[in-house]
Amino acid sequence: MGATFLVCHGAWSAGWAWKKMHPLMAACGHRLVTPTYTGLGERAHLANPSIDLETHIEDVLNVIKYEDLRDIVLVGHSYGGMVATGVADRARDRISQLIYLDAFVPDDGQSLLDLNEPARPHMHALAKSGDGWRVPPNPTPPDTPPADLEWLTERRVDMPIKCFEMPLRLRGGKLTLPRSYIYATRITPADTFGPFARRARSEAGWNYFEIDASHSPNVTAPEALMALLQKIVGQQA
């Protein structure tokens, strides 16, 4: 029987960025649900300075509620690791396992900028250079094919800085769901996600995997990502 994958996408992105994964998921008998956060993608017209991490957690929780999703494989990519952790905290009975894909893994009280302190001055400078609350997209990885680069550049939009500043608040205590970390090994010089990969390798309760891809394998290595996700859910079956 197929699984239901629910994606918490990365910053500046949206559900559209998982387009290549839908036919691969369907071919394996799985359902892929890729909601878009408020203020991004097809919901960009709703962007405003008040949007924060809590907004995006509620976006996904409402998809779970109104779609009546159960036995979910929750995938958090990049910034989506912040969102997925909050969603998992509040919908523990609906989620079978949690997969972090080259993602931030926060503890209670931590914001994305707490986890990526070197980026704090740069993010604030970018926001202040505009209208004070929007952060333009980060560059895409250098190995992104030209056609994908054009596709991404046309669709990525600015991110409200409160999403990066707001600390995550866990309401149900420490998460004990089965969890896996996928580390994309074609790293950028900053290696933003290396600390989380090392944590997953050394801390009890984690399954650790690597993928030969840059930061967004859903775009640049969809077949390899599908094979790895299939392996992970097979191990938990």
Image (cartoon, rainbow, N blue to C red):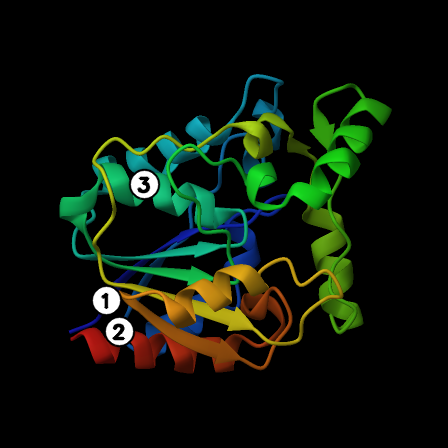
The residue at 57%/70% (across/down) is 217
* Closer to viewer: mark 1 or mark 3: 3
* Closer to viewer: mark 2 or mark 1: 2
Residue 9 location in percent, x, y?
A: 50, 50
Q: Is residue 17 left or right of residue 146?
A: left
The residue at 71%/28% (across/down) is 134
Q: CA distance from mark 2 to mark 1?
A: 8 Å
* Residue placed under numbered mark 3 in the picture: 87
Amino acid type for the residue under numbered disc 1: Ala
**Between discs 1 and 3, the one toward the N terminus:** 1
Q: Quadrant of residue 87?
A: top left
Verify CB contact (< 8 Å) between mark 2 and mark 1. Answer: yes
**Between discs 2 and 1, the one toward the N terminus:** 1
Binning the other alpha carbons within 10 Å of mark 3 as few (below 14), some (14 to 19) or many (20 upward) gives many
Amino acid type for the residue under numbered disc 3: Val
Q: Is residue 89 left or right of residue 39?
A: left
Residue 16 location in percent, x, y?
A: 55, 53
Verify CB contact (< 8 Å) between mark 1 and mark 3. Answer: no
Binning the other alpha carbons within 10 Å of mark 2 as few (below 14), some (14 to 19) or many (20 upward) gives some
Amino acid type for the residue under numbered disc 2: Val
Binning the other alpha carbons within 10 Å of mark 1 as few (below 14), some (14 to 19) or many (20 upward) gives many
Q: CA distance from mark 2 to mark 3?
A: 19 Å
The residue at 56%/45% (across/down) is 115
* Residue placed under numbered mark 2 in the picture: 233
Q: Quadrant of residue 216?
A: bottom right
The circle on residue 3 is 1
The residue at 54%/67% (across/down) is 218
